[in-house]
Amino acid sequence: MVEMAPILVVENLCKRFYGNSGIVDAVDNVSFEIYEGECAGLIGESGSGKSTIAALVAGLLPPDGGSVSFLGKCLTSDKSGRPQKLYRNLQMIFQNPMAAFNPRYKMAESVAEGLRYYERLPSKRLRELAVSYMEMCGLTPGDGDKYPWQLSGGECQRAAIARAIISRPRLLICDEITSALDVSIQKQILELLADLQKRLNMSCLFISHDLAVVSQFCQRVMVMHDGRLVESGPVADIIGRPQNEYTKRLLASILTVSCPDTENIP
Ligand SMILES: Nc1ncnc2c1ncn2[C@@H]1O[C@H](COP(=O)(O)OP(=O)(O)OP(=O)(O)O)[C@@H](O)[C@H]1O
Ligand SMILES: [Mg+2]
């Protein structure tokens, strides 16, 4: 059951890049909210601005306009500066888990980094916590002594989830976190995430190309096209009764790719 209190409010967010081929309005006047305990999906073709939104919300990029409020505090106003401690409650996981870890650190040390910045704890306690969160994510205590290159992609992504949840965030931003994994591993990672999301009562902003994945994991979906949010609503409505022309085309292209017309193959 989703409670109706937004923990994230994004209003009129804008980000413009000046690239070699001209100006790109990567995020163009985007507004949305994410509610307590909710998983909201963000879909759209490559280059539509999904990762830029994630970076703006997580404070990795300054916006050119608009605002982001998280847990009632404005993250984007110049006056207050960036309230770093608030970011404990807002964590991110990315597509390539191997690249997300320093190859010189053992996994337990890297996972502990997710908490070390926010809480002063003795090293022994930090390590215990890191190992227990790794176990919660389906890894073994022995994995804590391994380096990232000694784990599989799926195991690395489990460790990335452990590092993100060790600070017990209220909002988790997942940017294409299953795209680099085999289909069978994707399913395991999604099941793990769905379980953790409920147990820890986190909200999620779940970014993906894959509508099947989004419909499995999210209650609501938002559709991006050329930097704009063109449609949003319950997953069943967007898939069953898309209103926007771009959403219809996006759905049609996904269905064509996943159900090729085998009769026409020579
Ligand atoms: N640092 C940057 N400098 C210049 N242009 C950028 C920069 N970051 C993103 N862009 C451009 O902004 C647009 C949106 O990019 P973004 O990475 O947000 O898309 P995306 O929806 O995440 O795509 P994908 O599905 O491929 O990950 C693209 O046209 C991209 O080329
Ligand atoms: Mg992206």
Image (cartoon, rainbow, N blue to C red):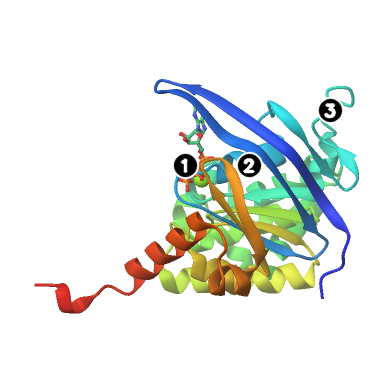
Neighbourhood count class around disc 2 (C-alpha, 10 Å): few under 14, some 14–19, many 20 upward: many
Residue at 71%, 55% (x, y): give it. 172
**Does the image show residue 126?**
yes
Three-letter code, disc 1:
Gly
Dot label at residue 53: 2
> Label 3, on which residue?
77
Q: Up-down: is 95 above or below 16?
A: below
Q: What element does badge 1 sit on?
A: loop
Q: What element does badge 3 sit on?
A: loop
Whichever of labels 3 and 2 marks the residue nearer the N terminus, that label is 2
Residue at 87%, 68% (x, y): give it. 3
Question: Horizontally, is 40 left or right of 16 in the view?
Answer: right
Three-letter code, disc 3:
Ser
Residue 65 screen position, x and y as percent? 72, 28
Based on the displayed image, in which of its 4 quarters is residue 54 positioned? Answer: top right
**Does the image show residue 152?**
no
Three-letter code, disc 2:
Ile
Whichever of labels 1 and 2 marks the residue nearer the N terminus, that label is 1
Question: Horizontally, is 120 left or right of 237 in the view?
Answer: right
Neighbourhood count class around disc 1 (C-alpha, 10 Å): few under 14, some 14–19, many 20 upward: some
Residue 225 screen position, x and y as percent? 52, 47
Whichever of labels 1 and 3 marks the residue nearer the N terminus, that label is 1
Residue 59 screen position, x and y as percent? 72, 35
Q: Whole-Å distance between the Cαs marked 1 and 2?
A: 11 Å
Q: Is the CB of mark 2 within 8 Å of ligand 1? A: yes
Q: Nearer the viewer, residue 197 or 79?
A: 79
Question: Horizontally, is 6 left or right of 237 in the view?
Answer: right
Q: Nearer the viewer, residue 51 or 130?
A: 51
> Label 1, on which residue?
47
Q: Is the CB of mark 1 within 8 Å of ligand 1? A: yes
